[in-house]
């Protein structure tokens, strides 16, 4: 039956081009054309099936065959044979590996209770079949601890949910109609490349472009106005625009009365932030902030592309609220090319977790940003088994040193299920090989331009790799949980069966084509808030109860005299989070403003030591005014091999949480930087890390 989805797949001989989709954690969800020759992938490229993809994709995924067939790929299940962290394994069969995991799960449940097992997963593969299917049936059915998946989009998601009920955002296609585009804490030139041509076309048609980012991103260079604010100050910048709108009588009182609640309380809080005060806190010229307010008030259609850069700090939830409130207060909805774009993943009429049959048990909920604490400090019960999939927490979670100390625990049984050998698999007791999206079925739901597409295997599974759905299904069967499918085809059919009929038909009848692709809703014409009263909640005070936040209140900057520099870690064009980092061949460099470097006697060919009370990191340095003074930047997604001493920026990131939403505070790392004596980085460590990168 499933063959119908896969007319060309896994062909052993001959040449074919198969249509599928990229499910990586990127907003674009490109439609792909994959060329296969004699059962081997020879080319991955964009297809035109999805309008926004328009036949081109990023360089990362064009290189994906190097990952599929690369040296780092896991071929077989393995059991640890050396110390934790070393990553050496003896090959075992799937049956041996799964029997061992199942028997450990039973033993742990008997001795400590099932809550001593912690599943740990995130967006490695963002599809609807690679998570919330048999994995959820297994872990819910067994009664393990639950994971609060907060590492990304937690504060922005909480804000968008509370304020708008995650109303659908503006499609990329509609950006050409805007007269003003504000790119706020987003860097689409790297992190969602298909938006860029629409912004450029709007500019050709005369639109004004404003970028709000501590770095001079490629779009900031082409913008009419760039506000290089200090990280974590977005909330006061947005409140100053609100204050300007309210005080000058430029707020859209008719819209506020008809479609919102809470504007008076927002107005009170924004009154604290006149432009001069906000500009001083944000470290920008008051005139530039005034210009933002003026232009935003005066331009229609005006659109805000809100990214995730603004959420990754202690003020991140309030920043998202204050930014998303702007189109409501300024009356920017109701026209094509006006409104906002945030994540669209919540814009569908269902949530993936709705499809899980097993009820969610009321077990311990662990905030994933506290992984290190969970492993080292939790008792009642302690974490005795960690089951990692779709995630690389040894490098991607806050407070890396604490995470690594936790992973080193001898009495912790760690399973890591991944496609390649990563910094996390090095700590596994059992390692399991996963298929890539070119070897299994998936359903990719975009969080950028609204689309849903069927992904299908274009080659046979590499080595003994297996899809998530089958592995968790097989474990469920061993543990006596009934009714859990253990083939990916069954999982696919069950998911399709649970989808709204229109979406299912699009996916199936058009041979796995695109549902909703050309859907270009105008906010407040075609789509409305999905809050209980259908209004925009400008002061969702229930959020105050869920975090430590007071709404629209700025919590200050964590900088100190000892650690004055803000370290940020924006997305890089080499990796998607840490995925594809195995192909990296260059040592990472810290970008620092030339004046900050000069003040510390640092020159371009030096090594640097970046440090705070949590740890220190040694790496190369790049002097550039693309970061503002007081801010330093290292790429997101680094592997341990990328730096001289085997740590990533997360070694300097506190595991404190955002004002609400429980999010990660990656941009709250405050550090000092010193020149590294050459002798320090000409040592053995350097050779090891650099040598490993040069395959
Ligand atoms: N190539 C590539 N693409 C990706 C990813 C990747 O790793 N690589 N990751 C994917 C994922 S998981 C996500 S969540 C998205 C993220 O997509 P984006 O939000 O676009 O990416 P980021 O790089 O996290 O942050 C965007 C910008 O915010 C800036 N920034 C940092 N701190 C602040 C701040 O406090 N305020 C403001 N205004 N700006 C700030 C950074 O300098 C950066 O340029 O991208 C996805 N796409
Ligand atoms: N310093 C700093 N750290 C950050 C961020 C930052 O801005 N700064 N950004 C954060 C953000 S936005 C995010 S989203 C997180 C992401 O962090 P993670 O969730 O850890 O994502 P990845 O690093 O991409 O790791 C995903 C892993 O899943 C594996 N995988 C992919 N598909 C499958 C599959 O089908 N089955 C199995 N079993 N495995 C699979 C991949 O091979 C990869 O190793 O990182 C966060 N970390
Ligand atoms: S990572 Fe993003 S841009 Fe690259 S192919 Fe996938 S969806 Fe497209
Ligand atoms: Mo993310």
Image (spheres, grey):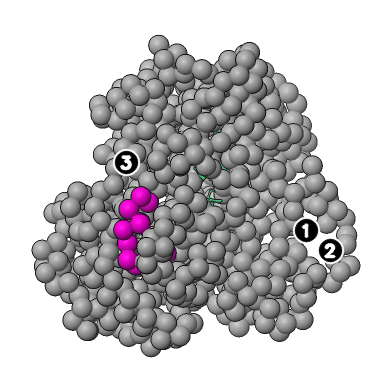
Mark 2 within 8 Å of ligand 2, using the beta carbon: no
Q: Which residues are magenta?
A: 172-183
Mark 3 within 8 Å of ligand 3, using the beta carbon: no
Q: Is residue 551 left or right of residue 511?
A: left
Q: Which residue is mark 1?
A: 644
Say above or below: 598 vs 68. below
**Mark 2 to mark 1 CA distance (whole Å):** 7 Å
Please tell me which of labels 2 and 3 falls first in the chain. Answer: 3
Work out whether residue 604 or residue 19 is closer to the camera in this orientation and state it. 19
Q: Magenta span has 166?
A: no
Answer with the quadrant where ligand 2 appears in the image: top right
Q: Which residue is mark 3?
A: 518
Judging from the image, what secondary structure is the residue with disc 2 in? helix
Q: Magenta span has 179?
A: yes
- On residue 661, the disc is none
Q: Residue at x 19, y 55 (%)?
A: 524
**Mark 2 to mark 3 CA distance (whole Å):** 53 Å
Q: Residue furthest top?
A: 1
* Number of marks present in the image shown: 3
Q: Residue at x 76, y 41 (%)?
A: 86
Please tell me which of labels 2 and 1 falls first in the chain. Answer: 1
Q: Is residue 447 left or right of residue 118?
A: left
The reply to whether dot 2 and dot 1 touch (C-beta < 8 Å) is yes
**Mark 1 to mark 3 CA distance (whole Å):** 47 Å
Which image quarter holds the C terminus?
top right
Q: Is residue 360 visible?
A: no
Please tell me which of labels 1 and 3 falls first in the chain. Answer: 3
Q: Which residue is mark 2?
A: 681
Q: Is residue 65 visible?
A: yes
Q: Residues within 10 Å of mark 2 (few under 14, many from 20)?
A: many
């Amino acid at each position: 039956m499933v063959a119908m989805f896969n007319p060309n797949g896994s062909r052993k001989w001959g040449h074919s081009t198969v249509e599928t989709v990229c499910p990586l954690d990127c907003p674009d969800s490109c439609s792909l054309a994959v060329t296969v020759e004699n059962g081997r992938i020879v080319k991955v490229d964009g297809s035109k099936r999805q309008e926004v993809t328009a036949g081109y994709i990023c360089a990362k995924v064009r290189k994906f065959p190097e990952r599929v067939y690369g040296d780092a790929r896991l071929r077989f299940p393995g059991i640890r044979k050396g110390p934790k962290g070393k990553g050496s394994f003896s090959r075992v069969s799937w049956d041996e590996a799964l029997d061992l995991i199942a028997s450990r799960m039973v033993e742990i449940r008997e001795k400590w209770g099932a809550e001593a097992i912690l599943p740990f997963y995130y967006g490695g593969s963002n599809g609807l079949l690679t998570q919330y299917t048999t994995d959820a049936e297994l872990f819910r059915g067994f009664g393990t601890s639950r994971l609060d998946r907060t590492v990304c989009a937690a504060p922005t998601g909480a804000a968008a949910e509370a304020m708008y009920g995650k109303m659908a955002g503006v499609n990329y296609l509609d950006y050409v109609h805007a007269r003003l585009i504000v790119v706020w804490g987003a860097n689409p030139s790297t992190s969602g490349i298909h938006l860029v041509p629409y912004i450029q076309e709007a500019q050709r048609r005369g639109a004004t472009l404003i970028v709000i980012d501590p770095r001079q991103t490629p779009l900031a260079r082409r913008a009419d106005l760039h506000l290089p604010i200090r990280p974590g100050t977005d909330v006061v910048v947005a409140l100053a625009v609100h204050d300007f709108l309210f005080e000058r009588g430029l707020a859209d009182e008719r819209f506020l009365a008809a479609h919102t609640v809470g504007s008076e309380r927002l107005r009170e809080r924004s009154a604290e932030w006149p432009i001069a005060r906000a500009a001083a806190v944000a470290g920008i010229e008051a005139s530039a902030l005034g210009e933002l307010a003026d232009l935003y008030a005066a331009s229609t259609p005006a659109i805000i592309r809100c990214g995730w850069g603004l959420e990754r700090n202690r003020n991140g939830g309030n920043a998202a609220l204050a930014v998303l409130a702007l189109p409501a207060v300024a009356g920017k909805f109701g026209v094509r090319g006006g409104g906002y774009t945030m994540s669209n993943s919540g814009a569908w009429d269902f949530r993936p977790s709705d499809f899980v049959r097993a009820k969610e048990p009321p077990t311990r909920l662990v905030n994933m940003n506290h992984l290190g604490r969970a492993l080292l400090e939790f008792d009642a019960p302690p974490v005795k088994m960690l089951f990692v999939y779709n995630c690389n927490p040894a490098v991607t979670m806050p407070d890396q040193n604490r995470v690594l100390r936790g992973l080193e625990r001898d009495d912790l049984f760690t399973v890591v299920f991944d496609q390649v050998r990563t910094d996390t698999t090095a700590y596994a007791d059992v390692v399991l090989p996963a298929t890539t999206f070119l070897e299994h079925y998936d359903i990719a739901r975009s969080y950028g331009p609204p689309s849903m597409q069927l992904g299908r295997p274009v080659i046979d599974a590499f080595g003994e790799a297996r899809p998530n759905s089958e592995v968790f299904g097989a474990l469920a069967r061993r543990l006596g949980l009934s009714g859990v499918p253990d083939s990916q085809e069954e999982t696919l059919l069950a998911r399709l069966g649970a989808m709204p009929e229109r979406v299912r038909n699009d996916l199936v009848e058009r041979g796995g084509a695109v549902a909703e692709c050309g859907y270009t809703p105008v906010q407040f014409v075609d789509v409305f808030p999905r809050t209980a009263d259908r209004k925009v909640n400008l002061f969702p005070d229930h959020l105050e109860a869920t975090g430590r936040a007071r709404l629209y209140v700025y919590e200050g900057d964590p900088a100190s005299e000892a650690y004055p520099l803000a370290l940020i870690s924006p997305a890089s064009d080499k990796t998607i989070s840490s995925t594809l980092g195995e192909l990296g061949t260059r040592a990472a460099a810290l970008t620092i403003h030339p004046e900050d470097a000069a003040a510390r006697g640092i020159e371009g060919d030096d090594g640097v030591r970046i440090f705070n009370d949590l740890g220190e990191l040694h790496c190369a340095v790049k002097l550039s005014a693309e970061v503002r003074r007081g801010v330093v930047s290292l790429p997101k997604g680094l592997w341990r091999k990328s730096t001289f001493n085997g740590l990533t920026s997360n070694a300097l990131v506190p595991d404190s949480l955002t004002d609400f939403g429980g999010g990660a505070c990656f941009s709250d790392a405050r550090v000092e930087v010193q020149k590294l004596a050459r002798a320090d980085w000409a040592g053995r460590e350097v050779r090891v890390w650099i040598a490993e990168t040069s395959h």
